[in-house]
Amino acid sequence: MAHIIVLEDNLALQRRMVEIISEADFCTRISYATTVADCKKKLLESNIDILLVDLNLPDGSGSSCIKLFSKINPNSISIVISALSDGNSIIEAIENGAIGYLHKDDNSLQTIDAIKMALNGHSPMSPSIAYKVISRIQDLSTLNIKKKAVGNSPSILTKRELEVLNMIAKGLSYSETASYLEISAQTVPVHIRNIYKKLQATNRAEAVFEARSAGLIE
């Protein structure tokens, strides 16, 4: 049996959620809040088991409530129900402790079913949200692989090659790079070829991208 709090500033939607949840057999008590401040106050004053939280609130992000709730109760269950679906919002909520994320426009997974899934140790998530989570993880995995490959490579860029790369990353021409570094104009293309080879790049843009991804330049 659970004490549930609903953080939602849309009063019509809030009332509807409270009405639906109050009839569930797992709900012993239900509270509601319309602001981040009010929600945090209730989290600190009451023994809450489940937090259903919108993210885009008038006084801030509901994600901060998830973070507080996770600190107060490590076994807490937080489920986001929000129209926000950008990668940063999703990842921030999950990192702060959310175990589920429903998009408000998704009718495939109902609130009651999502809570039951969470109570049974699962992570309810809208398909569109799950896709973005997987995509973000894959992007990070690819980035880490590139960093590891470059970092472990015996042909890591030399100090001079890094200097040349920084110059071309700023948009300087070969002649401008040679003048700035006080080196021969004929040696710049040689350094560029070596940089491309080591970073497995075929042009300036690729070389700069790979170097930044590997943390070699800012």
Image (tube, rainbow, N blue to C red):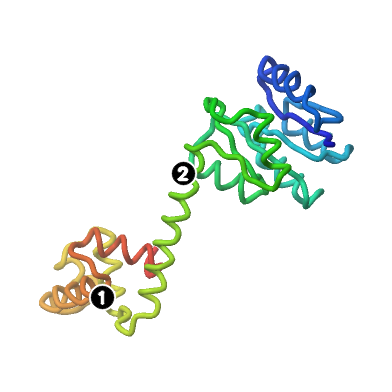
Q: Quadrant of the N terminus?
A: top right
When asked about the image quadrant of residue 116, the answer is: top right
State the image coordinates of residue 25 (x, y, percent, origin top left): 80, 29
Residue 128's place in the image compared with 15, above or below, is: below
Q: Residue at x 70, y 33 (%)?
A: 52
The residue under label 2 is which amino acid type?
Lys
Element under label 2? helix
Which residue in the rendered view is the most extreme toward the bottom?
Answer: 154
Q: Nearer the viewer, residue 123 or 38?
A: 123
Q: Residues within 10 Å of mark 1 (few under 14, many from 20)?
A: some
Image-based side of 90 in relation to 33, left or right: left
State the image coordinates of residue 201 (x, y, percent, origin top left): 22, 66
Image-based side of 216 in relation to 182, left or right: right
Q: Nearer the viewer, residue 183 or 116?
A: 116
Q: Quadrant of the C terminus?
A: bottom left
Q: Residue at x 72, y 40 (%)?
A: 65
State the image coordinates of residue 121 (x, y, percent, origin top left): 69, 48
Which residue in the protein does label 1 denote?
A: 198
Image-based side of 48 in relation to 147, left or right: right
Which residue in the protein does label 2 denote?
A: 132
Give residue 59's mark.
none
Disc 2 vs disc 1: which is toward the camera?
2
